[in-house]
Amino acid sequence: MIRCISPIDGTVYAERTTLSGAEAADAVSRAKAAQRDWSTRPLAERIALVQAGVANVGKMNDEIVPELAHQMGRPVRYGGEFGGFDERASYMASIAQDALADIDIEDSGAFRRMIKRVPHGVVLVVAPWNYPYMTAINTVAPALISGNAVMLKHASQTPLVGERMAKAFHEAGIPKGVFQNVFLDHQTTSDLIAAKSFGFVNFTGSVSGGRAMEQAAAGTFTGIGLELGGKDPGYVCDDADLDAAVDTLIDGAMFNSGQCCCGIERIYVAEQHFDAFVEKAVAIVNGYKLGNPLDPETTLGPMAHKRFADTVRTQTAEALAQGAKAHIQTFPQDDGGAYLSPQILTNVSHDMRVMREESFGPVVGIMPVKDDAEAIALMNDSDFGLTASVWTKDVARAESIADQIETGTVFMNRADYLDPGLCWTGCKDTGRGGGLSLIGYHNLTRPKSYHLKKA
């Protein structure tokens, strides 16, 4: 049984029964049978059906927004995820014809030689709870468009998301076997992967979860895409627009209660701006309203689960014991459970877990740096590599710094955004593979060569 415990009040919001091993195998069989017909449909038809399914999700948004608040705590004032959900799916639809086009090598009187991109077959998408619609559509849309069948396994914290997507896509005309929402426990998921049930697996989640996926796939040669943990840095150079940097980086650290894959978890500031940056950051955070996410006045909701908040509290307490300075007093609404006060820490170092391990909560450490070299060394002093945010007025300087940072994406003068035209990827313990963009289609298909002698 999968149970969603609402962070609002600790009650069971939804529960679903997981599939047995036999039921899960039957679902795979239905997907494989349905995929064969789906892949023969014209590409334009597949694109249109996916776009119609996306539009159907948009029609549900008034119901989805409070559901998300109940499931994972995001305040209703932010209006859900449909904007990004639609942007990503629409972009992938717009580039599909070119991304999946045949590569013609020769078409002469003697030979027809080309490379086609063909679907893997059945793609398993294991999606996280923090941005449950946007992270899922990153793979679901291009996988379906490129001719794969998709099985979506959502996180236990957001079980209603997959049901919503399945309803929307089926009503649009996508066959039920082609897109299936499934409730699976960890062992059944591993067993299916080990049994070569899927042509490709995309997982977004924890580092330990990624390791479990790789272990399950060992020896099967199943393709795996992994987007795992992060400890994303921001660097404020000496020539930065300080007000813009503070506003964006602190929002990137605190939005969604810090539960963002590419959220800012550590900030390095040119030493001459350090005091002013911290002062401005503290003023912003002290203006937040922590509370029930169903209240339109709430700007900071609870974390998705008490155990996630406990991790942040423990990291923060350890840092304070090691000499860090806390700048935010405990909010009255902090209940010691899922409702957690935001925190800004200074006097921090990389000897502290809060600066090295993923926090995934509303806490950020800020350190002064003397120059670009010191900032680059600190940004690279991490087991993770998802995004980094550099603040400067000099594009050439930003690109030079970016070339030296070990990460998947580098932003200049912005943060915490996923551009569907660029490859969403990471390095080190953040994982491997790449989603969205042209490269996303390449990862969800395989090249197949044709060497046709005409005579």
Image (tube, rainbow, N blue to C red):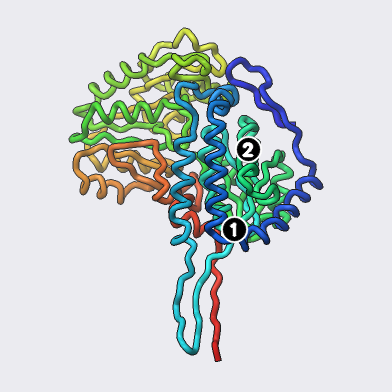
Task: Pick the residue in front: 361 or 375.
Answer: 361
Disc 2 marks a residue whose amino acid type is Gly
**Which quarter shows the C terminus?**
bottom right
* Horizontal and vertical percent position of residue 70: 59, 22
Q: Which residue is mark 2?
A: 162
- Extreme-right residue of the structure: 22
Residue 351 appears in the figure: no
- Residue shown at the point (62%, 35%) measured from the top left: 164
Q: Which residue is mark 1?
A: 147
* Horizontal and vertical percent position of residue 447: 53, 67
Relative to residue 367, is residue 55 depicted above or below? below
Label 2 secondary element: helix
Residue 166, quarter of picture: top right
- Residue shown at the point (78%, 50%) measured from the top left: 26
- Residue shown at the point (54%, 74%) measured from the top left: 449
**Which quarter shows the N terminus?**
top right
Give the class, few, some or many, for how many residues have Cα within 10 Å of label 2's Cα (few <14, many ≥20).
many
